Image (tube, rainbow, N blue to C red):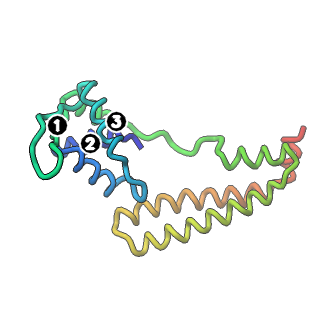
Amino acid sequence: MSVPLTLLGLLEREPSHGYDLKRDYDAFFNRGKPLPYGQVYTTLGRLARDGKVIAGEAEPGVGPERKRYVITEAGATEFEAWLTEPVAPEPNLQTVLFTKVVLALMLGRDAQQYLDTQRAAHLQRMHELTRLRRTGPIIDALLADHGLFHLEADLRWIELTAARMDTLAAAVRT
């Protein structure tokens, strides 16, 4: 996830204080892992330095003074280019799962045990996401669906790899 581009998108919607940007980012994009305030303000500082946002004058209010940030033409142009550019299709051809299995086989370790452990972890996460999909708001449900589809693909790969373990072991031990 690109924090700077996401913040630019939120600013395109309306000028905002850093506090409001963090709140909206956490509410919509970072489920379960809040964006640190320090990262918000550091990112806004870099965006201002690069001419993509303008920080307004400090405004008095309850608590510390706040600055309202506004997206610039350069920021809007960069955001629009990012928004319309397709995301690189996943998956990468070499994943951590694959690497661990091959290394286990190369080193004469029990790759099947690793696959079994990984399968159990995937199933546990799938149960959590299924619960979230059933009980959460639409944003959580759609994110849960996305995660479930990826986990299902991983599980299919785990089963296929387990079925081809002997052939793979022979290929990596040569």
Q: Which quarter of the picture shows residue 48?
A: top left
Tag in front: 1 or 2:
1
Q: Which residue: 68% across, 50% down?
A: 97
Closer to the chain start, of discs 1 and 2, is: 2
Most extreme residue toward the top, as rendered?
50
Question: Which of the numbered marks, if any, corresponds to residue 70?
Answer: 1
- Residue linked to disc 3: 82
Closer to the chain start, of discs 1 and 3, is: 1
Residue 116 coordinates in the image, percent (x, y): 74, 63
- For label 3, the crowd category at 10 Å Cα-Cα, with few meaning under 14, some 14 to 19 and many 20 or more, is some
Q: Which residue: 11% across, 34% down?
A: 57
* Relative side of 41 to 62, left or right: right
Residue type pointed to by label 3:
Trp
Q: Which one is in front, 167 or 76?
A: 76
Residue type pointed to by label 1:
Val
Q: CA distance from mark 3 to mark 2?
A: 10 Å
Say if mark 3 contacts mark 2, CB within 8 Å: no
Q: Which quarter of the picture shows residue 171?
A: top right
- Residue linked to disc 2: 9
